[in-house]
């Protein structure tokens, strides 16, 4: 059914159609609307049977989800930003225990300084936690990926994060096709856990494992992620047959087969990138793009195949590995190792900074002309940065940089003495 609907509400309706049995909820912007809507649906009996549990923290949310999943229930939660960091220990426990929990990440920046707007620093901080990570480009894809995520998680008995750009998608109203319950039921079978706590058949989950076996246990977690590389395209194909649209998968090339320059990115920015690619193609520029939908496990072979004919690769990423540069770009470089192709890292959109078509157009022009630096910060205000560097180098008590930058922009009037 087509609806003009907020992204968070669309995601909530998709989750409800997946028949979760336990929803663990703690509010944090920008995912709050998802769990609020789910709470209303449970209260109205639209999701039944389902236990909706208000917890005291994000750590508690994941801990309750672990307990519910271990007891054999289909479990769901959502978080963002600092909330994901607060539950980090439990995030690792969920994957280490092999529990098929599904969690939405409403992608948001991590402080300090405080910032509630979108980038990918939160989910990428957990990229090695053993969770499958799927990134939505649109709200339609956010809906579709959650339905696929439950089936993927439960077939492999691994947890799955569905990453949805905060505000850009979660708070945007647009037309979304919400499936019928019968369609979802036909695609997603009832939950049949590989492992569950049962008093009639007692087992230990999460026992102490020493050096004699720990590496083997971790290898098996890696093995399951590698299995996902084969299963994800199969589930995407089955989804297309059931729902009539192409959604999910490992990667999505766009006008890249004959492109000299290929732009790689995660999430909603791919929409803007495609618009610029279309404009530049009309002007005769040989450019295309590659959207990575599955970031963990990293689809190295698919990325390498999509990029092998490119002359240059530009990775636009909403994250920063302080001290080295790109996070996604590092994995892309690994994928194309030996092909002798330059990989340019462009840090963009941190803290919600708009990534405009004009800025991307200029960036891609520089790449096409061979003038793009190895590492570049899109729309960086160099004069403010240089002023603060001079201040820090010129005086010992230079004060907090964030406030100095804001004062330099005229955003705050207070003096720091």
Image (spheres, rainbow, N blue to C red):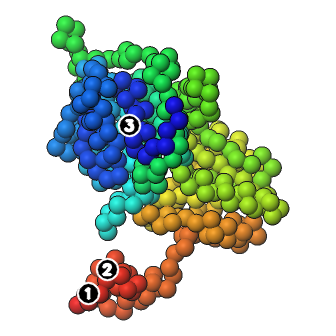
Which comes before the other along the chain, label 2 or label 3? Answer: 3
Q: Is the residue marked by circle 2 packed among few (<14), some (14-19), or many (20+) residues within 10 Å?
A: some
Residue 79, image x, y percentages = 32, 45
Residue for badge 3: 12
Residue 179, image x, y percentages = 50, 28
Identify the secondary structure beneath mark 2: helix
- Taking depth in this image into account, of 260 and 33 the one nearest to the observer is 33
* Location of the C terminus (image quadrant): bottom left
Can residue 330 be seen in this snapshot?
no
Residue for badge 2: 403
Residue for badge 1: 414
> How far is the residue under mark 3 from the one under mark 1?
43 Å
Which comes before the other along the chain, label 3 or label 1? Answer: 3
Image quarter of residue 217: top left
Closer to the eye: label 3 or 1: 3
- Taking depth in this image into account, of 158 and 114 the one nearest to the observer is 114
> How far is the residue under mark 2 from the one under mark 1?
9 Å
Residue 127, image x, y percentages = 43, 45
- Taking depth in this image into account, of 232 and 278 the one nearest to the observer is 278
Q: Residue at x 31, y 66 (%)?
A: 114
Q: Residue at x 61, y 47 (%)?
A: 291
- Mark 2–mark 1 CB contact (< 8 Å): yes
Q: Is the residue marked by circle 1 packed among few (<14), some (14-19), or many (20+) residues within 10 Å?
A: few
- Compared across the picture, whether 72 is left or right of 151 comes to left
- Mark 3–mark 1 CB contact (< 8 Å): no
Q: Residue at x 22, y 8 (%)?
A: 201
């Amino acid at each position: 059914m087509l609806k003009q609907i907020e992204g968070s509400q669309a995601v909530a309706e998709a989750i409800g159609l997946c028949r979760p049995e336990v929803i663990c909820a703690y509010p944090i912007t920008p995912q709050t609307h998802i769990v609020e809507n789910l709470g209303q649906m449970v209260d109205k009996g639209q999701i039944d049977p389902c236990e909706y549990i208000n917890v005291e923290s994000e750590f508690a949310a994941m801990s309750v989800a672990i307990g519910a999943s271990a007891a054999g229930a289909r479990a769901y939660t959502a978080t963002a930003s600092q909330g994901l960091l607060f539950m980090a220990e439990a995030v690792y426990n969920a994957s280490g225990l092999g529990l098929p929990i599904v969690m939405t990440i409403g992608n948001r920046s991590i402080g300090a300084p405080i910032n509630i707007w979108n980038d990918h620093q939160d989910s990428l901080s957990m990229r090695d936690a053993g969770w499958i990570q799927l990134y939505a480009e649109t709200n339609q894809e956010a809906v579709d990926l959650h339905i696929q995520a439950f089936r993927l998680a439960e077939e492999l008995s691994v947890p799955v994060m569905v990453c949805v750009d905060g505000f850009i998608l979660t708070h945007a109203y647009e037309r979304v096709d919400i499936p019928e319950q019968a369609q979802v039921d036909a695609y997603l079978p009832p939950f049949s856990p590989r492992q569950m706590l049962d008093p009639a058949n007692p087992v230990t989950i999460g026992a102490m494992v020493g050096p004699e076996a720990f590496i083997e246990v971790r290898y098996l977690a890696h093995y399951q992620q590698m299995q996902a590389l084969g299963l994800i395209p199969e589930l995407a194909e089955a989804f297309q047959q059931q729902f009539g649209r192409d959604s999910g998968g490992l990667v999505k090339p766009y006008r890249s087969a004959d492109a000299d320059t290929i732009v790689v990115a995660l999430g909603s920015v791919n929409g803007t990138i495609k618009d610029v690619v279309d404009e530049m193609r009309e002007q005769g520029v040989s450019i295309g793009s590659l959207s990575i939908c599955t970031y963990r496990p990293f689809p190295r072979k698919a990325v390498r195949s999509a990029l092998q004919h490119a002359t240059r690769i530009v990775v636009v990423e909403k994250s920063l590995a302080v001290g080295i540069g790109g996070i996604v770009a590092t994995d892309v470089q690994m994928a194309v190792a030996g092909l002798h192709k330059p990989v340019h890292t462009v840090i963009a959109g941190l803290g919600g900074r708009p990534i405009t078509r004009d800025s991307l157009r200029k960036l891609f022009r520089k790449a096409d002309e061979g003038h793009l630096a190895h590492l570049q910060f899109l729309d960086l205000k160099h004069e403010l940065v240089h002023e603060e560097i001079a201040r820090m180098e010129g005086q010992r008590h230079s004060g907090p940089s964030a406030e100095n930058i804001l004062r330099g922009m005229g955003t705050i009037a207070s003096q720091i003495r």
